[in-house]
Image (tube, helix red, strand yellow):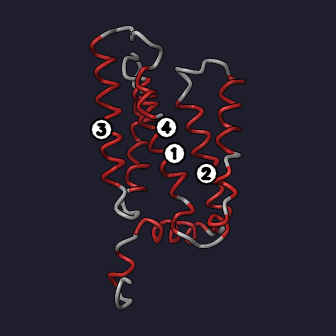
Amino acid sequence: WRGVYGGMAIAEDVGFALWLWLLNALHVPLLLGNAALWVAACGFAAWAAKPLLQGTLVRLCLFCFLAFQPVSFAFFNQRVYRDAIFPALSLLLFAGVVGLGLRLNEKRLRGSLVAAIVAGLGLAGTWPFRGGGLGFLGYALFCLGLGALFAFKNTTPLLPGPHIFAGL
């Protein structure tokens, strides 16, 4: 359905090809690399929710809930398939944007900077997949705008972390 296979056939979905290249360069097996990316995304999501979820046990429960989602055991994750890393990249983007929104009115910029960098990496990773990057870019801009509205309009928002509602 894509026509004759050539150099441009792979150029459309370059994100997964780059992921395979990175794992090959690091000598990491594909399934282990995919699982490590998913666990890292779950850990980052638990860190990003720290301003909203103060207890360590609560964040550990969030991490476990995310890490053992059925998508991590899905059949397409057990073979060489481009959608195997898409949920992890999406989680990195969503958690980064929400984490940045929750930290917009903090004095220290370190947490905001980490969240912004990871959100940018998540967006850069999801961009080459099936043209879904435009939808994710719209989501990220909407969340950042909503977070900026609440962070700069009020020094104390009316609700604890109202920017989180954009991620639901």
Instruction: Give how far apart the Cα atoms at labels 2 and 4 are.
Output: 13 Å
Instruction: Give how far apart the Cα atoms at labels 3 and 1 are.
Output: 16 Å
Q: Which residue is mark 1?
A: 91
Q: Secondary structure at mark 2?
A: helix
Label 1 neighbour load within 10 Å: few <14, some 14-19, many 20+: many
In this rendering, the answer to whether 105 lies above or below 137 is above
Q: Which residue is mark 3?
A: 141
- How far across and how far down the image is residue 162, in percent? 42, 20
Q: Identify the residue at image location x=40%, y=9%.
A: 158
- How far across and how far down the image is residue 27, in percent? 63, 69
Q: Secondary structure at mark 4?
A: helix
Instruction: Give how far apart the Cα atoms at labels 3 and 4 are.
Output: 14 Å
Residue 43 lies in quadrant: top right
Question: Answer yes or no: do the residues labelled 2 and 4 have beta carbons within 8 Å?
Answer: no
Question: Quadrant location of the N terminus?
Answer: bottom left
Say left or right for 73 vs 80.
Answer: right
Q: Amino acid at mark 1?
A: Leu
Q: Nearer the viewer, residue 9 or 113?
A: 9
Question: Answer yes or no: do the residues labelled 3 and 4 have beta carbons within 8 Å?
Answer: no
Is tag 2's residue or tag 1's residue first in the polypeptide sequence? 2
Q: Which residue is mark 4?
A: 95
Q: Identify the residue at image location x=47%, y=67%.
A: 16
Q: Amino acid at mark 3?
A: Leu
Q: Which residue is mark 2?
A: 38
